[in-house]
Amino acid sequence: MGVRLAKNGSYAEAKPYLERAVARATQNHTRALDAAPEYYLALVERGLGNLKRAEDLFWRCTWRLTHKKEAYVEIARIAALRGDWQEALARIDDALALGQDEAKLWTMKGIFLRKLNEKNVHVEHVKHLNKESVLHDLHVLHGQSKQCYERAVKCDPLEYWAVVEKEGFEAAEKNRGLKAQQLLECISDYWGIGCYDEVIALCDAALAKAAAEKPYRTEGALPLKDTIAACDSYKNALFGYFKGAAQLKMKNVANVEISSTNTNVANEELGTGNIGIGNTSTLATLSAAAEMPTDYCFPNRLEEEEVLKMAAKAAPELANTWYYLGCCEWNHDRKDAGLVDWKRCVELCEAENSTRSTRSTRTNHNLSTFQPFNLSTSSYALALRCIGFALSHPGTYFTNTGVPSGIPSKEAYEYYLKSLEADPTNFRTLDEAGKLAEKLNIPAPKRLALMEKYRSTVYKYDACVLRLAYTYNAVGRYAEAHEILTTRRFHVWEGADGLLAPFVESCIGLGKAAMAKGDYKTALKYFEESTTYPANLQAGRPGDAGTEPKSRYFMAQCKKALGDEAGYKAELENSFKGWIHAGEMDYWRVKALRELGRGAECAPLIAELKAAIKELETPAPVVINAYAKFAGDNSAMERAAKAREKAGALRALLREISGVDTTEANGK
């Protein structure tokens, strides 16, 4: 439990668990046989800013082989945070003595040697030492650093950090995937060893590249060039936040060096990052970061959470900061904290909107001049969507209390509606709102009204279009569902809902409507179409009979009405081809048998239908479905609800064909 909480950044909550683990492990030993409890407790203490306590615990871990190398690495990082590069170098050498094949360790050694080089240059200028001796030492250290970077790249040719050190940022970015994420990973590494100058330099380089980029589309059917542009883009607000936080850290380090000679006090100040109020340039940096577009900015690293917390403390009036922080905390399974931060973001946005409205009213009574938030940079609509998602997904993802597919929450649905009003173009919000509306059992006409209100948004996303087709069928508007399902090309995605079922339903619905008007030729065409597999739906013929028994039965009725007796009987016979799953198709085969005068053969089909009802009504064991697609609509609760609904429909069919009390299906 302590380890899981620590990995999620919940340091205060993890500490009591790990302290109990350490007490248990050291109950009968001065040093625990397994250093894991003390190692993780040390990580927690470091995360809480207690660097001296963390360092003591890491040293204890070096007494055992388990986590010995990792402990030396962490001691080196703490020394680097203090600016003690000689100690950092000694400890990274200790770690390398236990493992020569780790690229990051060689990179860190090279950086520590470089920092010693820079420190010696400073000393030479300040103290006027022997210039020739100093230059010789600098040359040696520079050569050693280069060798370390070469060794790192030899261990791992994809070691980005070493390439940045050896050849620079421009060389490292070549032939990479998501360039911004690669660079953010590198910046996080520098952040962890207190190299704030390097953090600022890399952030400046990234922001300069972002400013020179051409616009690209971020939604809808994207051409390849826009997808490539997004992968290559450096338009990410986190670069601005890292830069601002690094400026705050450097200001804090300078204050500590000037005001404190107590090593312990200095350590604690460096650990907590007690930032106070940032200077004007830092606040300008954070404000610029908050103004950047939110597209493709998904903070998830613990270093990014630390940076965002610093930004929120330094400039609490920046709404987007709270949105990003909430995303980070939600990702780390601290849902309550994430929800609070998203609500803070919404409050700030609404307060700013109200202020702008008031200011506009005072200066110009013409309200048409009022300019609300620019949705391309404001996180208002996104925060509302996140709140809706949070309220409908309580509990954690890692215990049985979690409901991955969500629960019906009216409050959450209201937040989704507000989000759509703020940004009517977000198809993800509309998709999630549609799913929640179904869970809330909102009547189909109301759900349809919402989708028709945002029709242009619906057509951006296959899942929304498919839901629209299903809803058209549900309200009996089969022609509109049929038009969608015969004209739009759908792209099958993993875990997608069925595309063929609504197509068959629309065809049969149109056919039955034509039959009711006495137009049997048109009805026959629709029933025949229901047995096809359109290419635009990317749906192939199944191995079983599918729903053909139902279609064939209606085709038989049309041919009978048109006077084609032979065709009528042939279609009834065709309804028996292929095997079927127990359920509705048993009903249609029973009807076909009875029309052919073969009622004696119906018993096995009726028994199969009863067995299907019994299986659906039998309570399933309460388990977590490991094969649910991407935490989708596949929770035990939802499966049970769908089973009950399906069982009720089958009972109605069974009553019609058996003429008996269908409670017999459960053996009652």
Image: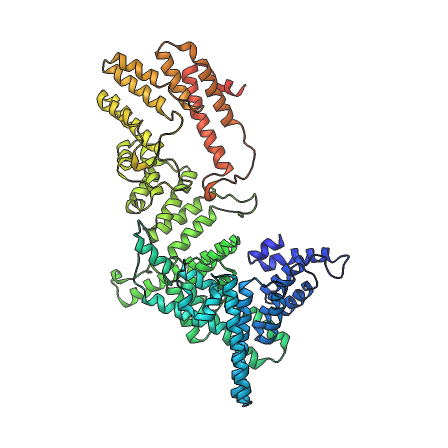
User: Tell me, what colour scheme is on the image?
Assistant: rainbow
Q: Is residue 558 visible?
A: yes
Quarter of the C terminus within the rendering: top right
Residue located farthest toward the right when viewing the structure as drawn: 28
Front residue of 470 and 301 = 301
Locate residue 364, reporting x and y percent. Answer: 26, 66
**Residue 61 left/right relative to 478:** right
Locate residue 422, reporting x and y percent. Answer: 34, 53
Q: Is residue 244 visible?
A: no
Front residue of 50 and 152 = 152
Front residue of 122 and 423 = 122
Locate residue 178, reporting x and y percent. Answer: 41, 58
Relative to 67, does residue 260 appear above or below in the rendering?
A: below
Front residue of 645 and 165 = 165
Locate residue 43, reporting x and y percent. Answer: 61, 62
Relative to 516, does residue 469 appear above or below in the rendering?
A: below
**Residue 13 left/right relative to 32:** left
Q: Tell me where residue 113 sits by quadrant.
A: bottom right
Relative to 566, does residue 282 appear above or below in the rendering?
A: below
Name the residue at 55% across, 67% down. 106
Relative to 458, does residue 263 appear above or below in the rendering?
A: below
Q: How many marks?
A: 0
